[in-house]
Amino acid sequence: MKKIIVSVMILCAMAPSFYAQKIKGSDTVLPLAQKEAEVFMKSNKQAVTVIGGGSGVGIAALMEGTTDIAMASRSMKLDEKLKCKSAGKTIVEKIIAYDALAVVVNPSNPVSNLTREQLEGIFTGKITNWKQVGGQDMKIIPYSRETSSGTYEFFKEHVLLNKNYVNSILSMPATGAIIQSVSQTKGAIGYVGLAYINKSVKAVHASFDGKKFIAPSMKNAINQTYPIVRPLYFYYEKKSEAKNNPFIKFVLSGEGQKIVESVGYVPLKK
């Protein structure tokens, strides 16, 4: 009995310095935040829970007060900022890494190069067959993330120049689902964060000037030759800064930025 009482007393004494932290949002940031949390928790009395769902989902959770940090692969929208302001919330933005957004096709597809205009045509429905872009006579099957995804928003803004996706586009709930679908469908095309590229899909070389086609890679993102690069964000309330600072400082530290690179994203300084 005495041993049980002592154990309870020790746990009670530890409780004030040990707390849980919730992080929610971008599927692109998810593998990075999970790895950062895994390493961080080894030397800190702080439990960190990381959940995906999309940038919009994370930002909504932050506004509702159900997450400590929102992960996002896009910046907050004006209406989101206004909602926070009207609710008396002061939001802090931190860029934690960069990502090269890659367009992927099935490995059997001979098409390796696509211009921005061709990508726009494919994802808006103007181009429907691979033979229209130098490929086989095969129907194009485009995959996209859901509308709550920051990757969806970023691709629409920077690649489609804010034109609408084709109505028949197949929306996927997570980036991993796009990889799986493209790997299993010969005529498929989709877009994913750099860290998600694997041998089951082929990354397309992209060109925004119609002349030079560049592969999505860390090297090409760092030297700024690849045209589709974006920042990755953490958002949190300023009043919760003390709680969030230890983890955020770790992510921004030399050790944390080495993890960024090991996961497959681009560190802040190289």
Image (tube, grey):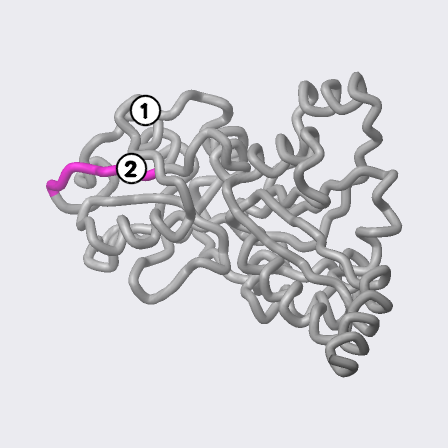
Q: Pick whichever of labels 1 and 2 is earlier in the sequence.
A: 2
Q: Quadrant of the C terminus?
A: bottom right
Residue at 73% over, 24% down: 81
Compared with residue 35, is residue 109 higher up or lower down, i.e. above or below?
above
Q: Residue at x 17, y 40 (%)?
A: 131
Q: Is residue 203 left or right of residue 157?
A: left
> Contact, CB < 8 Å: mark 1 with mark 2?
yes
Q: Amino acid at mark 2?
A: Pro
SS for tag 1? Answer: loop
Secondary structure of the residue carrying numbered label 2: strand
Q: Residue 39, position in %: x, y?
A: 67, 72
Give the vertical position of 164 relative to 40 (above or below).
Answer: above
Q: Is residue 141 magenta?
A: yes
Give the magenta part as a residue range.
137-143
Residue 118: % across, % down: 35, 35
* Few, some or many residues within 10 Å of mark 1 (<14, 14–19, 20+): some
Identify which residue is drawn at 49% across, 51% down.
193
Instruction: Report, in whole angstroms, how far the alpha carbon at label 1 lies from the one at label 2.
Output: 9 Å
> Residue 166 — which label?
1
- The disc labelled 1 sits on which kind of residue? Val
Residue 54 location in percent, x, y?
Answer: 52, 40
Left or right side of 264 for 19: right
Residue 106 got which mark?
none
Provide the residue designation for mark 2.
Answer: 142
